[in-house]
Image (spheres, grey):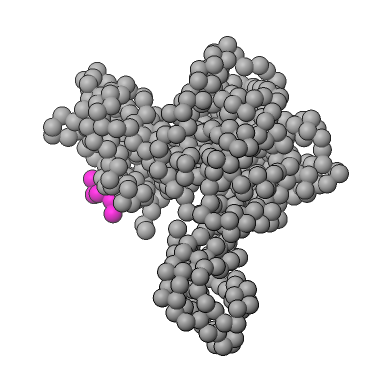
């Protein structure tokens, strides 16, 4: 059986979600496996299937900036999406897809990864589902079972609006937002950031993707339109995806912190020590404290030592013992005076943040 | 720990006295009160990986065979839990999963059950369900073809 590519071009923000869901839910064993390609004409925010919009997205900010919000039937976190991201969706009948989800990713990320490599970016598939370039993510992906189809979704990110992404998320504090923004800049890259003026044009990028997907799958690929059955499903799903009941269903899924890329998360917690409130906004990479900002209404002398304390803690393993040890040596070395605040309190608030 | 009457193939367990819908990856246990308890098979939990969330349809809901009784999100996948039998949901294991989201990854055939259902067309629909040995024969093909190995979460 050959493989169909539906190149939908630039579509409304709504259709950029609806079309692939429609192809998936209309799929039967007789339907060709399909890749849909598109980008949204205007920006929007999309939450993961089980997320609660009110808890994840700054709705007031989105309304103020004319950013619609929708929900996808794929997992993961809230994301900001716009016309600089070429969405690809592989829609495979379950009878023809690998059984293990890791194998699904391995098989269907090969094309997009090779497309980036063909452009000159040394991209790699980092299992389970990240595409990375030298430790920085260049594309998140997700998978779902929708009807009889297994769907793998992702995008070629030509450019990314880091600031808007950091703004659309609901965060506990502005420090947390800053940390997300810095972390996105540090750990998320784009085609144009990697290649500068050598970056392919949009159309060239799309062609490279189609060629590489065809090669990776070893199948004949042809460009084709949506079937009538799929178009009818598009009509139906437009209603579903704009129904407030779909958007505001309570899912109850709370993920720990905000994921920047595989293995890198930003968290925050506050802890009431006898000497006052201490708040830690942290970034964890693997099991190590990668970055930290401490704030609160506690007293510490010398006052400027707070920045050096943060630096001294960076690189510590995420364990209460190790963190307390790092803080205690700092206390001793700098002859810290902090009434009602101990190295143990510092370790405790970081652990609270890390444990969500 | 596996039950001694279970059949095990490449780490995947199939207990006796259960019925299986191999295509939907669901096990069914007949209860004394005429209801059935259902959950994901061992290969299914291994395939989707560690659960991060599950949302159940509410008790009282009438479902047709094939409809989703719950949606599951694992670290890397979202999908439905399709019922192999039509009927009314009488209970869900929401409380169990709220306490430990990894229940189905640790103990898919007992503590990790998902739904109890009062079947409405059991006699008609049970023919699609296979007993242990016949189910394993079908699973063996599926497991071999896809090189699957089952793992359980211990923590």
**Res B37 seen here:** no
| Quadrant position of residue A208 | top right
At 86% from the left edge and 44% from the top edge, which residue is drawn?
A197
Q: Secondary structure of the magenta portion, mostly?
A: loop
The magenta stretch spans residue B5: yes
The magenta stretch spans residue A84: no
At 28% from the left edge and 45% from the top edge, which residue is drawn?
B95
Q: Residue furthest right?
A: A197
Residue B97's place in the image compared with B116, above or below, is below
Across the whole image, how many numbered discs are drawn on residues?
Answer: 0
Q: Residue furthest left?
A: B33
At 51% from the left edge and 26% from the top edge, which residue is drawn?
A241
Residue A224's place in the image compared with A16, above or below, is above
Q: Which residues are magenta?
A: B1-7
Residue A141, position as x, y percentages in the image: 59, 41
For the N terminus of chain A, the image quarter is top right
Residue A341, position as x, y percentages in the image: 47, 78
């Amino acid at each position: 059986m050959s493989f169909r590519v539906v190149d939908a071009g630039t579509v409304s923000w709504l259709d950029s979600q609806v079309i692939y869901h429609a192809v998936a839910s209309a799929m039967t064993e007789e339907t060709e496996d399909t890749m849909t390609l598109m980008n949204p004409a205007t920006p929007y925010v999309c939450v993961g299937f089980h997320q609660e919009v009110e808890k994840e997205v700054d709705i007031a900010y989105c309304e103020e900036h004319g950013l619609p919000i929708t929900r996808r039937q794929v997992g993961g976190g809230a994301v900001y999406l716009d016309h600089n991201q070429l969405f690809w969706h592989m829609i495979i009948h379950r009878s023809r897809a690998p059984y293990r989800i890791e194998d699904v990713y391995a098989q269907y990320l090969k094309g997009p990864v090779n497309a980036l490599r063909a452009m000159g970016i040394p991209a790699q598939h980092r299992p389970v589902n990240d595409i990375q370039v030298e430790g920085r993510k260049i594309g998140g992906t997700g998978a779902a079972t929708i009807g009889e189809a297994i769907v793998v979704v992702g995008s070629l990110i030509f450019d990314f609006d880091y600031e808007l992404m950091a703004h659309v998320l609901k965060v506990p504090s502005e420090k947390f937002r800053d940390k997300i923004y810095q972390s996105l800049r540090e750990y998320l890259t784009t085609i144009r950031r990697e290649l500068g003026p050598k970056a392919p044009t949009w159309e060239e990028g799309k062609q490279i993707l189609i060629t590489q997907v065809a090669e990776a799958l070893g199948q004949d690929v042809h460009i084709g339109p949506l079937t009538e059955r799929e178009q009818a499903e598009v009509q139906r799903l437009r209603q579903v995806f704009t129904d407030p009941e779909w958007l505001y269903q309570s899912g109850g899924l709370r993920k720990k912190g905000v994921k920047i890329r595989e293995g890198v998360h930003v968290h925050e917690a506050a802890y009431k020590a006898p000497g006052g409130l201490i708040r830690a906004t942290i970034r964890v990479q693997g099991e190590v404290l990668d970055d930290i900002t401490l704030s609160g209404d506690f007293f510490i002398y010398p006052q400027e030592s707070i920045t050096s304390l943060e630096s001294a803690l960076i690189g510590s393993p995420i364990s209460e013992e190790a963190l307390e040890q790092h803080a205690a040596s700092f206390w001793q070395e700098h002859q810290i005076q902090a009434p009602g605040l101990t190295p143990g309190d510092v370790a405790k608030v970081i652990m609270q943040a890390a444990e969500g | 720990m596996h039950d001694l009457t279970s059949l095990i193939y490449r780490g995947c367990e199939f207990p006796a006295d259960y019925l299986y819908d191999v295509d939907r990856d669901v096990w069914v246990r007949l209860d004394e009160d005429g209801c059935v308890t259902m959950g994901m098979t061992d290969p299914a939990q291994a395939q989707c990986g560690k659960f991060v969330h599950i949302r159940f349809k509410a008790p009282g809901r009438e479902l047709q065979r094939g409809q989703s009784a719950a949606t599951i999100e694992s670290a890397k996948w979202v999908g439905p839990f399709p019922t192999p039998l039509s009927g009314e949901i009488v209970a869900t294991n929401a409380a169990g999963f709220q306490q430990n989201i990894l229940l189905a990854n640790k103990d898919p055939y007992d503590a990790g059950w998902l739904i109890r259902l009062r079947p409405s067309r059991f006699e008609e629909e049970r023919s699609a369900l296979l007993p242990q040995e016949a189910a394993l024969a079908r699973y063996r093909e599926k497991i071999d073809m896809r090189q699957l190995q089952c793992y359980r979460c211990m923590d």
